[in-house]
Image (tube, coloured by chain):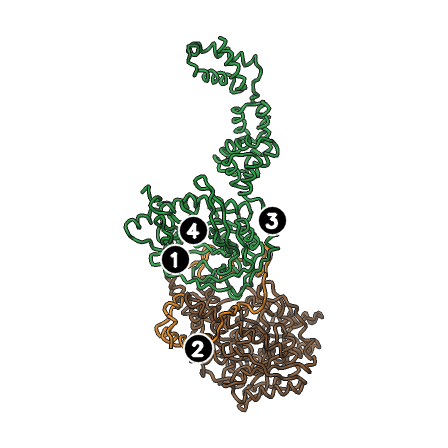
Amino acid sequence: MSDKIKIDHVAQLARLKLTEEEKARFSEQLNQIVDYIDQLNELDTSSTEPTSHVLPLNNVFREDELKRIVPVDSNEELLKLAPEHDKGHYKVPQIIS
Amino acid sequence: MMDTQSRYEVVIGLEVHCQLNTRTKIFCSCSTEFGKEPNENTCPICLGMPGVLPVLNKVALEYAIKASLATHCEVQALNRFARKNYFYPDLPKGYQISQFELPLARHGYIKIRANGEQKTINLTRIHMEEDAGKSIHGENLGHPDKSYVDFNRTGVPLVEIVSEPEMRSSEEARQYLMELKSILEYSEVSDCNMEEGSFRCDANVSLRPFGQKEFGTRTELKNLNSFKFVQKAIDYEVERQAQLLDQGDSVTQETRLYDSNKNITYSMRSKEEAHDYRYFPEPDLVPVVIDSEWIEKVRQSLPELPEQKRERFLKDFGLPEFDAEVLTASRPLANYFEQCTGLFDKPKIISNWVMGELLKELNNENRSIEDSPISPEMLTDMLKLIDKGTINGKIAKSVLEEMYQTGKPAEAIVKEKGLTQITDDSAIEKIIDEVLANNPNQLNDFKNGKEKLFGFFVGQVMKASKGQANPAQVNQMLKEKLNAS
Amino acid sequence: MHRLTLTSARQGLKEKKFSALELLQSCYQRIDAVEDKVGAFVHQNREQAMSQAREADQKIAGGEDLPLLGLPIAVKDNICVAGDLTTCASKILQSFESPYNATVVQRLKNAGAVILGKTNMDEFAMGSSTEASAVHPTRNPWDLERVPGGSSGGSAAAVAAEECLAALGSDTGGSIRQPANFCGVTGLKPTYGRVSRFGLVAFASSLDQIGPMTKTAEDAALLMNVIGGKDPQDSTSADVALPDFVSTLAGDVKGKKIGIPREYFAEGLDTEVDSIVQNAIRTLESLGMETVEISLPHTRYAVATYYILACAEASTNLSRYDGVRYGHRSSESTSLVDMYENTREEGFGEEVKRRIILGTFVLSSGYYDAYYLKGQQVRTLIKQDFENAFQQCDVIVAPNAPIPAFKLGEKSQDPLQMYLSDIYTISINLAGIPSISIPAGLTQAGLPVGVQIMGRHFDEAGVLNVSHRFQMETDHHKKFPSL
């Protein structure tokens, strides 16, 4: 089995604090899945264009008009969904820079 | 330390973030207005709530195209947005919608003046992206262990303009920024207000020994809130890097913040974690395809840009380069000047007065040309009075001051204060006679060969006439009088 | 009354045989009777639903005629309903009350529908069994020891258990068709771009589609008429004319060609499933349709491709759950890093974390080209397989899953085995084509098996037409479990 997924690094990138037990399990399961995925290497795709969207859609715009596209009455209502808010702001632990 | 610049070649590249002048955000219909209550300009879309989707603001795109054309960039036929992934409390979705492998435009340039010579700075690319929010330290709001987040800026449309590392001094960097700002203001894609954050700059700085081809290790400077700070931060950084290199140390590639109080740069994070933005095409947006017809249409809407205007001012008005440069630095100033030339056909005289007295008054009060209390009509009416000989240049300066203070037209001020120029020979002769009679010693000295005193007599006559005598006549008549007596 | 189809209930309401409120209450009585066993719902806002039903009754009395007036419909819990919880069966959104309606919900409401409850699902639609719900598992109404499939297992079970007349599900890699297949109901995944995704909590943005889960193809057509069509709030919704899907249901299918993809009838396909699907094909032939063998040669790469692309998109779609603006925040949040890591560790379940890690990995520096880009390229090949196939046929008929509903716990410990069970549904999402699962029979053990009918881009009408004709000939769709 490969060990391509460096679980500590990837979990840190994804901001997931995993338990040691989870790390071990995920590492095994995911490396197994990566081995499975590696079968794509059987295919020569050197001249194949990648597909991001299945439909040939482009140029979808909106006008530069002020409006409430989402009918929410007040920003207060949105702020109230926050775990912590104060003086009209969203409140988080101190950002150290 | 003075000779750093002769020991090392300074290499500077700039990344400018410029807010596009749209009414609404780039992917939602919230206002972009500055100075609102915290989080007033937010909605579920810019707050990144579950299930919401972005839709591109067409005007933002057109402004970005305009900015690209104004900087001679090639607008790319196929454009795609990409997600730039990182976690930060002011970034609601955990990714910023930006552009990566298919940016809006590439290969532009702008021309700057450096050491009296023209220099071309190439642009690598211009891409569109959304701005992040603003975090405020909790101590300002009574909770030092907390930070506060305001998402009003989140989703404001930006273009990022990336230059090649082709500037070789902090002065060139300043010139580049001034020219770029002027171009963007002219094109009316941005108000480029640095205080409100709508024109921001990061600088990549490195040093290398002269003759070396490879670039040295660079640092990225952030938090440069004015042109002055850009220059000072680069100067500081150049010295800092030079010292390191002199000692045989190496420069660490890192992001550094500029502290304008201490005039230093400092490392943002000592152990900066390796960034891995995991860019990939934004699946919630479709590609933007821009054909040549569309590009041409946008190009048609571009006004005359500073460079073209400068050339026209040189050619059509016969102005010296310096004047053309100053007058075209901002579009409103150039417009003011041109309005004046339509009213009075002596461009150089207009230029002198606009650049001299008028800008002096405005700068004293930190006012812009748009709120000048003296309109082009008022200024040119005054210049016509000089031209006709109604007032002389010296009096005109005080008239202009008065116009600026009171907003009254020149003619009214001249009439009210009796400032009309004295051109009557007999009146001038009378004053001359009095001056000569009152200064017998000087007259005697003059006669004994102290010819320098001629100027003294001119001054005395002008003073006695309260500045109103026609200076040319005074000169002429005084000469005759002194030679005759 | 809860046993009615949408179409027949609509008729009943029109003829004033019963009221919308009575119809709704009949569903709630059924829910109260069987929900303990099935567990199809995660929450219901009965007050709100009753007032919608009363409103519908007033409109009916006033002679108003709207396509879904007074009809109770369940909605998968990853679709936002304003003023209601939208939890995605996740701890991280367990108290999230959406301030806005998904476009499909707005359209349902505009058409007079009554939203009777939110259905269970695998957390964030990641799973094939609804066991990955943070709330509770849902059980298959045909056999309570077995899973209803997933991720729209709640919607499928609710329709099969007759707790509602119809439901909305979402399908990223088979999440409508596979549970429809396991529960013996009709489930349509529309063409990518046919139905707005605005307000559908994103799993994999380039694959997700909302679709109807109903008792008949006719009901699916009725719902598609309402939820389909361009939405200015979804850049990826297509500006393609929306036909009246009901009016073309009964059209003749004689002479139409059915493609039978060789790769879908290969090793690993359960023999009972195989014979039920073969029977269904014979029924279609009896309607005058012709069969032609086709090949979709890249089928075996679909699962790998899907898990690269879907997990990559999911990993960043789920970055917004950070405890800052809404949803769960860990009480262990003294520092910023703690807030992020503890919130996400506590808030996400195992399968979600696994996919976030896989998705983060395939996008990470050094692996993007080998995995993400490669996945996008193979996606092109899979899409081309279908383009080529549809030159030879009008619809493609295949099984939905290699085996019928499996037992709870049977696969939940082995994620790769779980992923591989999606083999027959996944390619369809990668290609973006419409596909339906309709009931085709029962196994010896009494488990339902469906047949899958795929169509060309935007040819839901063709798919529904074949399905409806099949249902006119058969009564598999009329069978319901006894609970």
Depth check, front residue: C303 or C66:
C303
Q: Which mark is residue B301?
A: 3
Task: Determine whether the residue tagged by mark 1 lies in a helix, strand or loop.
Answer: loop
Which chain: green?
A: B
Q: Which residue position holds label 2?
A: A36
Q: Amino acid at mark 1?
A: Gln
Q: Nearer the viewer, mark 3 or mark 4?
A: 4
Whether labels 1 and 2 belong to a single chain: the reply is: yes
Q: Which chain did the renderer colour brown?
A: C
Q: Residue furthest front?
A: B211
Measure how far apart labels 3 and 4 are at the Cα level.
31 Å
Question: What residue sits right under mark 1 in the picture?
Answer: A94
Mark pair 4, 1: CA separation: 36 Å
- Mark 4 lies on residue: B165
Mark 3 touches mark 2? (CB < 8 Å): no
Relative to C355, is B264 above or below?
A: above
* Marks 3 and 1 belong to one chain: no
